[in-house]
Image (tube, helix red, strand yellow):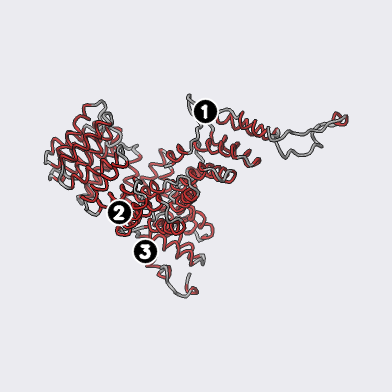
Amino acid sequence: MLPEIAERAAISFANEEGMRPRLVTIALIAILSTACQSTASGPSATALDDPLASAPPVTRGLDAQSLATLLTAELAGQRDDFDRAARGYLEAAERYASPALAERAVLAARYGDDRALLLRAVRRWREFDPNSEAPARLLAGLAMEQGDWQGSLEQRLALAERGDQGDLITFVEAAIEEQADLATLRDTLHRFLDEHPRHGEAIVATALLEAALGDTRRAERRLADLARVQPEMPSVWLVRGRIALQEGRSADARDAARRGLEISPNDSRFVLMLAQAQLRLGNVGAAEAGLDTLLERHPDAPQLRLALAQLYMEEGYNAPARRLLLPLIDNDPAPPAAYILLGAIADEQDEVDNALLYYRQVPPGEGFLEARLRAARMLIEADRLPDARDFLNIERLRHPERRSELVGLEIDLLDEQNLSEDAMALLDRQIRRHPDDTQLRFLRSMRHYERNDLAGMERDLRAILERDPDNAMALNALGYTLVDVTQRHREGLELIRRAHELEPESPAILDSMGWAYHKLGDNQRALPYLRDAYAAQPDQEIAAHLAEVLWLLGRQEEARAVIADALERFDERPKIDELLERLPELTPGDTADMDDAP
């Protein structure tokens, strides 16, 4: 998300030789040119130990300390210590209220590891240069990266309001893809349109959200009105076509795509939409002709071939898809997705052994596990479970570096077939052969936990920690279990503390810290950990922990607000349901007497 936004900020932090910061000369000259430093003068100056001791403070220009700070930052950047460089530039920027130095702090922080530092630098840049588009766009991107869709939208609308590019349509498409809170975003756009009823991009973005929320009629009316006043706006026809396809109105989608191509004849999105509409209308020849034209424009684009093949397959036309894919496997290396799609076509045509050959050719890397999973499932569906297990065993021998993942894959498949004892036997057998395999031991520890075999779980986690004392995941898993389901609370807390020292930002470990203090009766100390955990990773279990602690601290309305948020966010929420069974007063809207609360 961020890279695209950062690129459009039109800023470069690298020269042709790599990510090396430019010299700070220009920034220094700019600051030095604002004023000159004053020093003490006269005969009495020579009598002082420090000739500047009685000099007035430097309030403008660059003093020695600031010069040292900037030079240190520059050297840090040249040594790839970007966090230190960013802190130095930011310190100088804050002293001189300099947007140029704040911008430089942002550029350094982008290549560092401290996201909080990056956010602080961007905010300072915007504060010092409120009319600049770049910091606002970066803030919008950072908010979206952190899951703050509402905050990102507000930044974008501020840009749109002053005539800058808010990328509202791209933003809304990403929000739909990531299943954000679309209703809240829609309501925010409605309020914006109340004040800016003719903002074309906002209208299209709003229509996209309305359609995604099921209100396609309102979305279509909105787009039809916009088409009458801004008929040359390509996104109007693109979204109208998408809605038509979504509703099964293939002829309307075809007409929208044709209108879009009249406006933007080289826009591949309209070519694809037109082909999809033609396929749904049964006009395979017309669809192929359009897509062949697209391939002629981009002859060396394997990803395009893959996308077109998937389009054909989604519409039920495997033969043209296969024709597109076969040339790809002659390449060296061939795209893994080409083998996966060819395997899927062969599987659909009941050519199981042929499909197996395609799936096995996917090398380690992207698509490797997906191909093995598809192959094994195909064999199971063909009532060939022993063959599926033999296949996975052979693959473990062929690819020993992926053994643990392949064992996990087979275990999942056995569980799906209600063969949990066979799955456990496989896991035991593999651990006997490979006793140092941490991944397999952790997997078995979780299975012990599911079976309420806490002693077995602890044995496996202790075995991991004997070999790897700094395994934060094992420390946290064992510590949380001791805290949550035994009376060994302090022992569990010590394990969790060690995990927290290793990974202080982990939401799971923050939750464990908070829950441990809760179990020890210190809810006040538990609260900040649980707040930080839920802010970093909204999760139904963390929400249940946070709500319960808030309730016990007498903060009932806050607790209900957390529950309301969780009920809206999560379809599956067993921990929330369990909490509401124990504390029905927590239900949002409950009017129970507060005096009855714990």
CB atoms at circles 3 and 2 under 8 Å apart? no
Q: Which residue is mark 3?
A: 578
Seen from the viewer's position, the closer of residues 118 and 130 is: 130
Question: In x, y percent, where is residue 516?
Answer: 47, 55
Q: Is residue 166 left or right of residue 217?
A: right
Cα–Cα span, label 3 and label 2? 20 Å
Q: Determine the CA span between mark 1 and mark 3.
A: 54 Å
Residue 224: image quadrant is bottom left
Q: Nearer the viewer, mark 1 or mark 2?
A: 1
Q: Amino acid at mark 2?
A: Arg
Disc 2 target residue:
451
Q: Is residue 426 above or below residue 538?
A: above
Q: Secondary structure at mark 2?
A: loop
Residue 485 visible? The answer is: no
Q: Comparing marks 3 and 2, which lies closer to the viewer?
A: 3
Q: Earlier in the sequence, mark 1 or mark 2?
A: 1
Q: Which mark is residue 20?
A: 1
Question: Which secondary structure lies at badge 3?
Answer: helix
The first of marks 3 and 2 along the sequence is 2
Q: Reply above or below: 530 against 302.
A: below
CB atoms at circles 1 and 2 under 8 Å apart?
no
Q: Which amino acid lies under the numbered mark 3 shown in the image of this protein?
A: Glu
Q: Amino acid at mark 1?
A: Arg
Marks 1 and 3: which is nearer the front?
1
Assign the N terminus to one quadrant of the image.
top left
Q: Residue furthest right?
A: 43
Along the viewing direction, whichever of 98 and 346 lies nearer the viewer? 98
- Answer few, some or many: residues within 10 Å of disc 3's Cα (few below 14, many 20 plus, some between 14 and 19): few
